[in-house]
Amino acid sequence: MTEKEASNIVLVTGATGKHGGTGAYVVHKLRENGHLVRVLARRKSTMTEQLEKLGAEIVLGDLHDRASLVSAFNGVSQATFTYPMER
């Protein structure tokens, strides 16, 4: 990974949730368009394995844990919080 690529990482939260696959879809589309993607997940799961197969980097952490957020945001140029809208 070049220095330029490392500074263009998109962080996605909510990608492993069970809320209809919104976050996983966002990761898929970002990767499809050539973006480097980092996913913040609370724990390893079958979903994190699927996202890794798409080329996403998985970082374990929690939105309520500042230290894990500092690590997750290292080198990130954009971030998205994914959560589906209720119909």
Image (cartoon, rainbow, N blue to C red):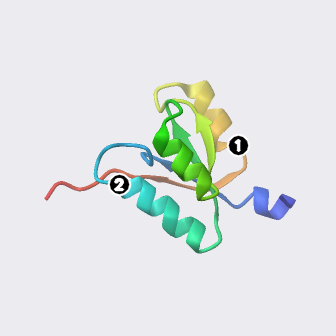
Where is the C terminus found, in terms of image quarters?
Answer: bottom left
Labels in figure, total: 2
For this rendering, which residue is in front, 56 or 72? Answer: 56
Residue at 43 percent of width and 44 percent of height: 16
Residue 64 appears left or right of 35: left
Q: Nearer the viewer, residue 45 or 68?
A: 45
How far across and down, in percent of the image, does residue 63 sit? Answer: 47, 33
Q: What percent of the width, then of the height, locates residue 65?
A: 52, 25
Amino acid residing under circle 2? Gly
Relative side of 48 to 5, left or right: left
User: Which residue position holds label 1?
Assistant: 74
Write down the residue under mark 2. 21
Looking at the image, the residue that sits furthest to the left is 87
Q: What's the residue at 45%, 49% (across, down)? A: 15
Taking 60 as reference, is 39 above or below it? below
Circle 2 — which element?
loop
Residue 48: percent from the left, percent from the top?
A: 52, 43
Answer left or right for 12 relative to 16: right
CB of mark 1 within 8 Å of CB of mark 2?
no
Circle 2 Cα neighbour tier, 10 Å, few/some/many (<14 / 14–19 / ≥20): some
Q: Quadrant of the N terminus?
A: bottom right
Give me the C-alpha separation between circle 1 and circle 2: 25 Å
Residue 49 in picture, x, y percent from top left: 55, 44
Q: Residue at x 37, y 43 (%)?
A: 17
Which of the 4 quarters of the picture holds residue 26?
bottom left
Q: Earlier in the sequence, mark 1 or mark 2?
A: 2
Amino acid type at image mark 1 = Asn
- Which element is circle 1 on? loop
Of residues 63 and 27, the one nearer the viewer is 27
- Give the foreground label among 1 and 2: 2
